[in-house]
Structures are given as structure tokens and as C-alpha cells.
Image: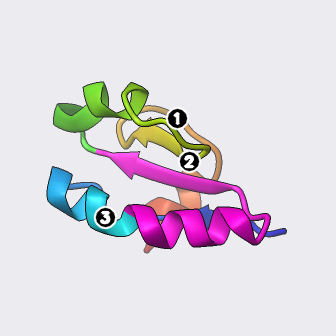
């Protein structure tokens, strides 16, 4: 399956809002990558799910595509 890049890096409320969307893609077998801002980087380790939360400032899979969108 193709990877899914979530483009909603700012705001904890926005991240909570998109979790259901991301989980839907995960259930269909997609790899879900959800970049977050540096300020919310602490948050990525506190969620218990299979979504890959990464810092937008770090290198991550498909970052070149993410930066184009």
C-alpha cells in the first residue's frame, strides 16, 4: 500500500481531529506518517497507535513529497 502523509502539523486539537482519519488509513494497510511541529514533538511519544509521528524539522520518509504539498 502507498504511504499516507498527513499535512496538519500545527495545533494539538488538529492532530486529535485527524487521528480518526489516520487510523482509517492504517486499518486499510497504509503506512501513515504525521509530521508535527517542533513545539509538539514531545506529543508524538505519548500516543498509543501505529501512526508515525515525526518532527517536520527532522529527516523522515517521503519528506520531499511532504515539503512540496
Mark 1–mark 2 Cα distance, whole angstroms, equals 16 Å
Q: Quadrant of residue 60?
A: top right
Q: In this picture, is 50 found above or below 23?
A: above
Q: In this picture, is 28 found above or below 54?
A: below
Q: Residues within 10 Å of mark 1 (few under 14, many from 20)?
A: few
| Left or right of residue 30: residue 51 | left
Where does residue 62 sit, x and y in percent of width and height? 63, 54
**Do labels 3 and 1 touch, CB within 8 Å?**
no
Q: Which residue is mark 1?
A: 59
Would residue 5 be visible to someone looking at this image? no
Q: Quadrant of residue 10?
A: bottom left
> Depth-wise, is mark 1 or mark 2 nearer the camera?
2
Q: Quadrant of residue 11?
A: bottom left
Number of numbered discs on residues: 3
Magenta stretch holds residue 24: yes
Where does residue 5 sit, x and y in percent of width and height? 54, 63
Where does residue 52 sit, x and y in percent of width and height? 55, 42
| Left or right of residue 50: residue 38 | left
Would residue 48 be visible to someone looking at this image? yes
Q: Residues within 10 Å of mark 2 (few under 14, many from 20)?
A: some
Q: Which mark is residue 34?
A: none
Q: Earlier in the sequence, mark 1 or mark 2?
A: 2
The C terminus - image quarter: bottom left
Q: What residue sits 55% from the left and 43% below the top? A: 49
Q: Which mark is residue 51?
A: 2
Which range of residues does the magenta coloring cover? 19-36
Q: Secondary structure at mark 1?
A: loop
Q: What residue sits 46% from the left and 41% below the top? A: 53
Q: Which residue is mark 3?
A: 8
Mark 3–mark 1 Cα distance, whole angstroms, equals 17 Å
Q: Earlier in the sequence, mark 3 or mark 1?
A: 3
Mark 2–mark 3 Cα distance, whole angstroms, equals 14 Å
Amino acid at each position: 500500500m502507498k504511504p499516507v502523509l498527513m499535512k496538519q502539523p500545527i495545533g494539538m486539537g488538529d492532530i486529535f481531529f485527524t487521528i480518526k482519519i489516520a487510523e482509517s488509513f492504517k486499518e486499510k494497510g497504509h503506512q501513515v506518517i504525521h509530521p508535527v511541529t517542533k513545539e509538539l514533538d514531545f506529543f508524538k511519544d505519548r500516543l498509543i497507535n501505529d501512526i508515525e509521528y515525526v518532527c517536520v524539522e527532522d529527516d523522515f520518509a517521503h519528506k520531499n513529497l511532504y515539503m512540496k504539498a
